[in-house]
Amino acid sequence: MLQKVLEYIHNMFINSPNPGTYTIENGAISPSVALKEGQRIWIVGSDLNDGVYTYHESGFRDDDDTDVAGLRDETFSGSVCALSIPPTIIALAGEIKEWVEQYGASVNSPYTSESVIGVYSYTKQTVNRAGGGNPSVSWQDVFKTELDRWRRVSF
């Protein structure tokens, strides 16, 4: 979810872009990029590994920091960008992920009720952050106020 949030706000919080030719072998990136434990990277230009990953001494993990990323072996010309994502954004991405898990199915449903007796009608499902109140149809709508602070016009 973190990568989706960063893409949505057009802000990857790039600290250093590091363009070049890279080889990924056995989960290691060469030449190496100076990273701190828990720091994120954004791989761009790869055929097999584009995305946001979290660095750990034990290996890279996916952008949600839940599973071993399983970086696939390849050589590519692109960038391995060290990121400096504020903790606020990381926490917000976690909240968004929880919201999507709780309300995503309802939001994606085309209706909440349907009547076939008499005149056909249906009601579109709407859910806000708390599950009621002001209607919203996506996590982007629900978290817009918090996300707008970090939004850029483009990458």
Image (cartoon, rainbow, N blue to C red):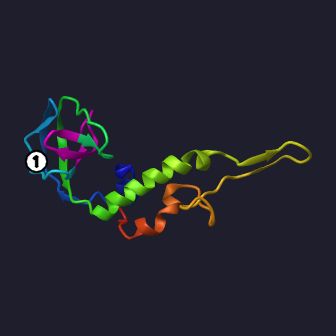
Q: Position of residue 70 (x, y in %)?
A: 25, 32
Q: Position of residue 1 (x, y in %)?
A: 39, 49
Q: Position of residue 30 (x, y in %)?
A: 9, 38
Residue lying furthest right: 118
Q: Main secondary structure of the magenta part?
A: strand
- Tell me which residue sits at (13%, 43%) in the image: 57
- Tell me which residue sits at (18%, 36%) in the image: 76
Q: Position of residue 58 (x, y in %)?
A: 15, 39
Q: Is residue 46 visible?
A: yes
Quarter placement of the C terminus? bottom left
Direction from residue 141 to residue 21 in the image, left or right: left
Q: Which residues are magenta?
A: 41-60
Q: Is residue 65 above or below residue 17?
A: above
Q: Please tell me whether mark 1 sits on a helix, a strand or a loop.
A: loop
Direction from residue 4 to residue 68 in the image, left or right: left
Q: Is residue 32 above or below residue 23?
A: below
User: Which quadrant of the figure has residue 11?
Assistant: bottom left
Residue named by callout 1: 33
Direction from residue 19 to residue 118 in the image, left or right: right
- Residue closer to the observer: 96 or 145: 96
Q: Look at label 1 and name its amino acid.
A: Val
- Tell me which residue sits at (27%, 33%) in the image: 48
